[in-house]
Image: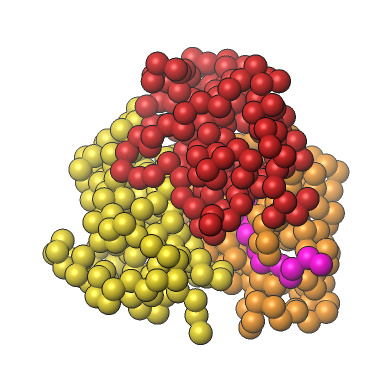
Chain colours: A yellow, B orange, C red
Amino acid sequence: MNASTPISPGTIERGLAELGLTLPEAPPAVSHYDPFSIVGTMVYTSGQLPWAPDGILAYRGKIGRELSPEEGYAACRLSALFGLAQIVKAAGSPDRIVRLVRVEGVLNVAPGFIETPGVLDGASDLLNAVLGERGRHSRAIATNPEMPLDCACLIYLWAEIMPCH
Amino acid sequence: MNASTPISPGTIERGLAELGLTLPEAPPAVSHYDPFSIVGTMVYTSGQLPWAPDGILAYRGKIGRELSPEEGYAACRLSALFGLAQIVKAAGSPDRIVRLVRVEGVLNVAPGFIETPGVLDGASDLLNAVLGERGRHSRAIATNPEMPLDCACLIYLWAEIMPCH
Amino acid sequence: MNASTPISPGTIERGLAELGLTLPEAPPAVSHYDPFSIVGTMVYTSGQLPWAPDGILAYRGKIGRELSPEEGYAACRLSALFGLAQIVKAAGSPDRIVRLVRVEGVLNVAPGFIETPGVLDGASDLLNAVLGERGRHSRAIATNPEMPLDCACLIYLWAEIMPCH
């Protein structure tokens, strides 16, 4: 896979459809910054929260207390889907994504909850499933004592896109 | 705005002057590392602390307990000013900054304090005001249970600069 | 030092030998992601844990409670050694590393433990000693309330390598 090879048209939509998903709207930033930035062919998203369709958070509170690990996994998966929407918006089209580079996840966990890698797999598994070999990524994992809006997680994606003309 | 277009001379100094600010000296690192690194045309700063002119911290302690949200905002603004000083030092001149790319902020908060995006706006608002359209950025936000020297915040900046000759 | 200048053959092995160290195997990722990603000439590692040779963690628990600061320093040094092993694997050979760019360290600390920069120097000192001028780096430091497997630290490295053919 060469960085300048285009992805086959429709790959991402088909990958999402196989999971019963469609690409959501890329959400606006929650404060005075942009949802993503582009430098050359790299896109870096801001933190993506697990929004419900009605514009409130689908997952709030601490994993291991208010939320089960399975709900934490679902929160990471949902946030990663919004991250993918940001990358698509940055690229201009799903077919202009070259590949994912990095996933960074921050989790809101109860004291003593250390099974965080399996929870963050909610993001990794979705992106691997949808993007296939182009979804391979390095990963950073964190837990924070307090999160914006008490969200269950924040997911950040780094991706490579085709050059803008 | 093309990445190779120079910024108009004096833009950053004028932007700072309108806010009643001048560019401080770029502070040294607090331990065995460099205050910034350069790769190609990208600069990445190390964490910037909210220093007072006398070389002690202007803002220490937890936002929401020892410090008000307004003091937290001021701490982020001050740290971002030092981040800008690092970028200028890396670029060689304020006029060689192409644009800001990313702001990462880590906040020292009291238990239950989740209004963190508005506090980190202290950094974003300053950089947006001084750099205008070139100040647009994606953002990462974090809270940490313990911070170096009990500082109120750490601010990291990513920026694009003109190529070195 | 130009980014395309090769490092002298054997530099890294000699640097390690002077410290009584050899390069370990690059460990696999602990979940559904890759241990590093490459974009152009940049390598970004996933979080490196302080593994013992028998595949269990050499340093677990909170620095300032279960672990002394000196043990925290040793944990960072050990994790950085695994980070170096990942960079070497990504580059294909120790002699294809151009330079280190950034060290990011997340520490597992007891409440009130703020002497974190000296602990993270365990990573910086090792990399500076082995890589010399090419080891210079910016740094990000964090503390997290809960860490994967209760590890003492996670170390992430960014490095520049020679272009792949």
Q: Is residue B14 left or right of residue A23?
A: right
The residue shown at (40%, 16%) is: C54
Asked whether residue B6 appears in the rendered view, the answer is: yes
Q: Which residues are magenta?
A: B154-165
Is residue A140 visible from the viewing direction of this image? Answer: no
Residue B160 sits inside the magenta stretch? yes
Task: State which quadrant residue C56 falls in.
Answer: top left
Residue A67 placement (x, y as % from top left)? 24, 42
Residue A69 in the image, given as x and y percentages of width and height? 23, 39
Quadrant in the picture for the C terminus of chain B: bottom right
| Frontmost residue, A125 versus B11 | A125
Q: Is residue C125 left or right of residue B22?
A: left
- Give the total number of marks visible in the rendering: 0
Please say if C109 is above or below A95: above
Percent position of residue A45, x then y:
45, 63
Q: Check residue C40 for magenta coloring.
A: no
Residue in view at x 21 percent, y 66 percent = A16
**Horizontal relation, residue B48 to residue B94: left or right:** left
